Amino acid sequence: MPVRFTAAAATLALAALLAGCGSAPVQAPEPTVPSPSVPEVAGRLTEAQAQHVTITALGLVGTPYRYGGNTPESGFDCSGLIAWVYRTEAGLVPPRTVAALQGWGQRVPAEAVRTGDLVLFGNGGPPTHAGIVVGEGRFVHAPSTGGRVRLEKLSAPHWARQQISFRRP
């Protein structure tokens, strides 16, 4: 029973977070049929697993950064966060370095990105940073020494200047 309560509480917290500060009531989105202009990208994650990945990533916001860290107790670096979340919520074992994540899963065009996908950042060479897409143009990542796992917008000036790519495990 406690696991169901925790998942339900996390789902409600995610819904509240995604609702933002608007005063209009939040309604569930209508089911959509992919349009021919948005390519279908296969992946190993089911929709339910992608949701669990997203909720778990959001739940780790505030965890301290630690270079080489790969657990909530010890802290995370960016690839350690990704490895822990995907292993815990989907039983997948991603590569442990950001550069290796570039070849993991399927490339996803920006218009087809969904929650649970990876976002990789770089400046022309191999990616140097990564996070987990949580929807509405936002991602969760472990930023740097002295920082904490946090939620940020892809459109923030620092990230918008980076070369961005997406992967679907």
Image (cartoon, grey):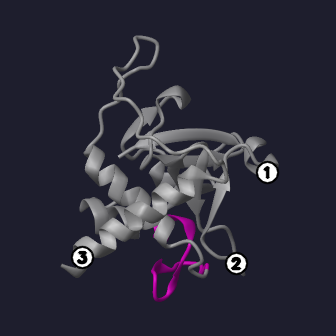
- In this rendering, does residue 148 appear at all? yes
Please state the horizontal and vertical placement of residue 89, each as a whole percent of the image. Answer: 30, 64
Mark 3 near mark 2, Cβ–Cβ under 8 Å? no
| Among the 4 quarters of the image, the one containing residue 92 | bottom left
Instruction: Give the mark nearest the N terminus, 3 or 1.
Output: 3
Mark 2 near mark 1, Cβ–Cβ under 8 Å? no
- Label 1 Cα neighbours within 10 Å, binned few <14 / some 14-19 / many ≥20: few
- Label 3 Cα neighbours within 10 Å, binned few <14 / some 14-19 / many ≥20: few
Residue under label 1, please give it: 158
| Residue 73 magenta-highlighted | yes
At a point 67% along the width and 53% down the height, the residue shown is 21
Say which element carries label 2.
Answer: loop
| Residue 10 magenta-highlighted | no
Residue at the farthest bottom position: 73
Tell me, for residue 145, which label it has, or none: 2
Please state the horizontal and vertical placement of residue 41, each as a whole percent of the image. Answer: 35, 29
Q: Which residues are magenta?
A: 65-82
Residue under label 3, please give it: 3
Tell me, for residue 131, which label it has, or none: none
Q: Is residue 53 left or right of residue 46?
A: right
Residue at the farthest right position: 157
Residue type, label 1: His
Q: CA distance from mark 2 to mark 1?
A: 17 Å
Residue type, label 2: Thr
Between 67 and 116, the one lying in front of the other is 116
Q: CA distance from mark 3 to mark 2?
A: 33 Å
Q: Is residue 60 left or right of residue 34?
A: right
**Quick check: 5 above or below 55?**
below
At a point 39% along the width and 47% down the height, the residue shown is 104
Residue type, label 3: Val
